[in-house]
Amino acid sequence: MNALIIAPILIPLATLVLTLLARRHGRIATFFSLAGATALAAVGLALVVFAAEGRILASQAGSWAAPYGISVVIDRLSAAMVAITGIIGLATVVFALARDDDPARSRGFHPLVHGLLVGVCGAFITGDVFNLYVWFEVLLVGSFALLVLGGGKRRLSGTVVYVVLNLVATMMFLLAAGMLYGASGSLNMALLAQAFAAGEVPATAHAAVVLMLTAFSIKAALFPVFGWLPASYHVAWTPVSALFAGLLTKVGVYALIRIVTLFWPDAGIAHEVLLWVACATMLIGVLGAAAQVEVRRILSFHIVSQVGYMILGLAIATPLALAGAVFYLIHHIVVKANLFFIGGIAARLTGSERLAAMGGLYARAPWLALLFAIPALSLAGIPPLSGFWAKFVLVKASLDASAWIAAGVALLTGIFTLLSMSKIWNEAFLKPHPAGTAGMRSTAGLRPALWAVTALAAMTVAIGLAAGPVMDYAVAAAEQLAAPAAYIDAVVRAGGH
């Protein structure tokens, strides 16, 4: 069981080493990368099966009792996040098998992707604030390198914005961790949760939590500190931008959910602030998307707006609202990664990402039109796709909590999202290409990319049609978050207290 708990870190770490050693042998490196991503997805799904039984898996590194040992904890939420990380990692590796104009780029791609997955999975399963900081650093190093992969002035300028804002957030997080340790003498999340619940921490500890949540808000791209995301994601190589779009902001959202539900489950002021931040994030993000003229910049702003829905669930903090946030996390990771994949294919076929220079895709590639329609309509919340159920639950939770303005903003954001998706549909798919058929490029070499896109589209449909079991899991995960006693008890017992 201990091996299963630590497998989400060991598998991508071992894959990183193997792909690095085989980087000069493309086929071997690709084989290792595919095998590692598949193994991570399989382990994640196995963890979901264990977690669905209500079991919380906890272990202490080196058998050192908390707070001295490093706690690793897997509950329903973290198991689901590891599973979806493995699935998106596998889809990204498969997509990258498509023929590329720069073969040298793929040689550095595989080790960096698995290095990023090490950090993401580590952040999802750690039970220690300092090690959460360490895993953030690991994934940031990988993301910096992936963002500049392939070079170019435009890519470099986007990376500078990304690096600066994320380093500011990282320094804030480190300062907050130091303050929290100085005030409480521990950084173990479960033990801190006990201390906060008992009122045994000074005001300095609460100030540290405020600073920590601010850092996570930057990483999650919440209003008003979201500008780094649409300035950077759209410049990366397509598999990289899709991986980022699916996972990176969700690590920040996960950290916000975990810290707030453990340390401040009943902090009314914090939830009130988060509620208004969520509303502003939804509205400003979707309005920013409406003003854009490039496909991936539109999609980047929609990441911002959709993160607002997840924080809305955290802000309302009822079991139903938290279930909506969990469901939305699962749905959005799949949908957003897929839209970035499709945006990259569309740009390759039309020769541009600017809507004015695109067109003719429906006539040239009707299969791509269908594959775009599925995640686009899901993002907007059209039934019976996954996005409809996620939005429905959050709007209902808002109405039940008398958060009328939040419910209205959520519905309005969905309408504007549909308009943005319609703009992409009309400009890129329906209208003729400005240069005629001569301006369209060949679909040769795209088969692996289409496999990845089709699989994620099918997953979106499946989540929507089988929303009951997924929602049952999300509700159970929300119950663990709303009543963290079982989480705390699992860590305490693993630590020998």
Image (cartoon, rainbow, N blue to C red):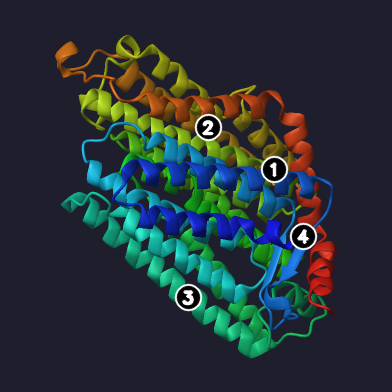
Could you say which is closer to the camera, residue 278 or residue 47? 47
Label 3 vs label 4, nearer the camera: 4
Kindly tell me whether residue 267 is visible in this rendering: no
Mark 2 to mark 1: distance in Å? 15 Å
Residue 324, numbered label: 1
Image coordinates for residue 334, horizontal then vertical, percent: 54, 37
Which corner quadrant holds the C terminus? bottom right
**Residue identifier under label 2:** 379
Q: Disc 4 marks which residue? A: 57
Q: Is residue 237 left or right of residue 94?
A: left
Amino acid at circle 3: Met
Tell me, yes or no, whether the two marked residues, 3 and 4, touch with CB atoms within 8 Å: no
374 w.r.t. 344: above or below: above
Q: Position of residue 96 (x, y in %)?
A: 37, 38
Q: Name which of mark 1 and mark 3 comes first in the sequence.
A: 3
Question: What residue sits 16% from the left and 18% below the top?
Answer: 439
